[in-house]
Amino acid sequence: MLQLLKTEYKKFRYNSTVSLLFILFTVLFPTVILAGKSILKNPSPPFPSNNIFYEFPTVWEYQGYVGNWLVFFIMGFMVLHMFTSEVSYKTMRQNIIAGYTKKEYFISKMIVIVCLAVYATIIYTLSCLVLGMIHTTGFDMELVFDNNWASTRFFIMCMGYMCFAFLVANVLRSGGLSMFLYFAFALILEPIIKGAMLYYLKNSAMNYLPLNTIEDLMCMPLFRTSSDFLQTEAGVSVVNDLNVTIGLSIVYTVLFVVLAWVKFKKSDV
């Protein structure tokens, strides 16, 4: 596996798109949330002050929500580019002709996805710890880690988004089409389906859609804290129970990987 990872690193270490996305993610992740200090100097209720975004334990949820968007856009785009560019430039074919089996090539891409998810989770965890320690007065370890397994949820979320991107890239194999479908499905198609389900079914079934479920791992914190009130008033739960969300996200992620492998195994190189 280490050899597969080394090969992937050599292929993309000088790729300008991958390098730019990687740097962009690393720089933006710990800094985007700080923009709230100047934008929301005197926030309206229910925010008591803008410190809620940076202090323990709420920093885990708000930084996770920021990371939700960054992982979806930047890491998802990176996975799409890394696979479809190899198809376009015949790199994948060269690897397999040179001795890779299809299984080894597929595993190498999964190793890259796992490494990217681990890296993003480390950046997330460190940024939460630093922001929280700077902005929280009199914190203790119990308060610091009162976060409902936030780092674990963030890692699962990263895997979910990137495995979905990998599936889309496998199905379409065209950079432009893959990127269009990836973003259109998440930002347009699934929200339309969600709205239709809410309108016609008038229940919480909409919350079980794949990307909606993965998003809910690190959703807007107010959605989770106010879900009981919204369910009482409207009769519809905004988010699923956290344990259900974690379990279902893992199932969807595994399904994405299995479908990607089935498609890849049957496709020509």
Image (cartoon, grey):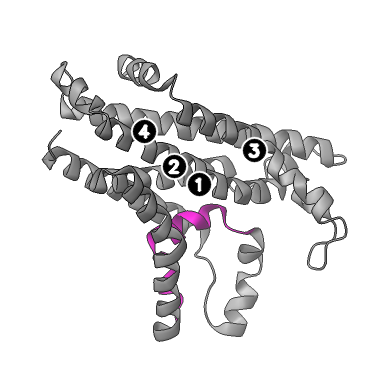
Up/down of 186 relative to 8, above or below:
below
Query: Pointer 1: what residue?
Result: 73
Distance between mark 3 and mark 4 Cα atoms = 21 Å
- Nearer to me, 201 or 186: 186
Answer whether labels 3 and 4 touch (C-beta < 8 Å).
Answer: no
- Nearer to me, 237 or 66: 66
Residue located 44% across and 28% down the image: 115
Upstream in sequence: badge 4 or badge 2 = 2
- Give the position of the C terminus as an image quadrant: top left
- Give the position of the N terminus as an image quadrant: top left
In the picture, residue 209 is in which quadrant? bottom left
Distance between mark 2 and mark 1 Cα atoms = 6 Å
**Left or right: 231 in relation to 117:** right
Query: Pointer 4: what residue?
Result: 82
Residue located 80% across and 62% down the image: 47
Residue 241 picture location, percent across and down? 51, 63
Q: Amino acid at mark 4?
A: Met
Query: Pointer 2: what residue?
Result: 77
**Left or right: 253 in relation to 149:** left
Marker disc for residue 28 = 3
Q: The magenta stretch spans which residues?
A: 203-220
Q: Amino acid at mark 2?
A: Phe
Upstream in sequence: badge 1 or badge 3 = 3
